[in-house]
Amino acid sequence: MKRAIVIMVCLFFLVPLFAEAEAQPGSVIEKGIASWYTSDKSESLTANGEIFDPSSLSAAHKSLKFGTLVRVTNLDKEKSVDVRINDRGPFVEGRIIDLTPAAAKQAGLLDSGIANVTLTLIFAPDVPESKYNRAGDTGWYQIQVGAYSSLLTAYSQYDRLLNAGLRPYAQVLPDTNAVRLTLRWIPAYQLDKTVKVLSALGFAEKDTLKKSEANPYK
């Protein structure tokens, strides 16, 4: 039985990982409402650990990797600005990006406060530009799906996850021979989609565990 466990787990690790293609530079990745924000505190920090600079051409986005460059085009005034993502937000429903005052002025929405925009990808770094090593700040997550005492059940669930286009990882727990299944190396921009896929497979979000993931590029 132990030999079978070793063979099955080896097969787990040898299966190629599925990687969904990311958006290509020059493509419009989002359309919605942009706004702008600032801070009344000196040396406030952005979500990636940098000092907030209202005069910089930077922005906050909910999921794009820190260091991503996007072109924000104001559809109301046909003005645009290229910004670097270094913060998280906006946290208002319906809004897709928060600009610094300098970026908002260049995009022609400083006075109006909001505008309809498109986001065009210019550049996405392989390694998120962050001073922290927390889930989301590194740009990577892992989700613990469950632990199974039956090897056949673990293999069956592994196969279902793999066929759904996810990245399952199997680990035999010491002293128990139970197999723990985890989804590894989930980029931030795919986290919500991954959770929805898991839900469709019968893995309720409340029964899974999200954890930080070490940056695979370091």
Image: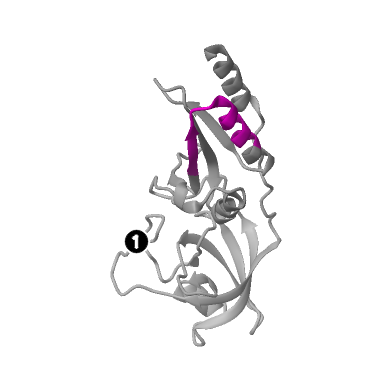
x and y, in percent, of residue 119 in the image: 63, 67
Residue at 39% across / 67% down in the picture? Answer: 53
Residue at 45% across / 47% down in the picture? Answer: 210
x and y, in percent, of residue 40 in the image: 31, 75
* Count of all numbered marks drawn on residues in the image: 1
Q: Secondary structure at mark 1?
A: loop
| Closer to the camera in the image, 204 or 171 | 204
Tell me where residue 164 sits by quadrant.
Answer: top right
Q: Is residue 81 above or below residue 210?
A: below
Tell me where residue 120 sits by quadrant.
Answer: bottom right
Residue type at mark 1 is: Leu
The magenta region covers 142-159
Q: Name the quarter where the N terminus is drawn.
A: top right
Tell me, yes or no, whether the highlighted magenta stretch contains residue 127.
no
Q: How is the image coloured?
A: one colour
| Closer to the camera in the image, 89 or 164 | 164
Most extreme residue toward the left is 42
x and y, in percent, of residue 202 in the image: 58, 49
Q: Is residue 2 above or below residue 111?
A: above
| Closer to the camera in the image, 59 or 166 | 166
| Closer to the camera in the image, 145 or 152 | 152
Q: State the residue position of label 1.
A: 45
Residue at 61% across / 74% down in the picture? Answer: 32
x and y, in percent, of residue 167 in the image: 60, 39
Does any portion of residue 108 appear in the rendered image? no
Image position of 110 (left or right of 119): left
Q: Is residue 87 above or below residue 18?
A: below
Structural crowding at the residue carrying mark 1, measured as other residues with C-alpha within 10 Å and reported as few (<14), some (14–19) or many (≥20) = some
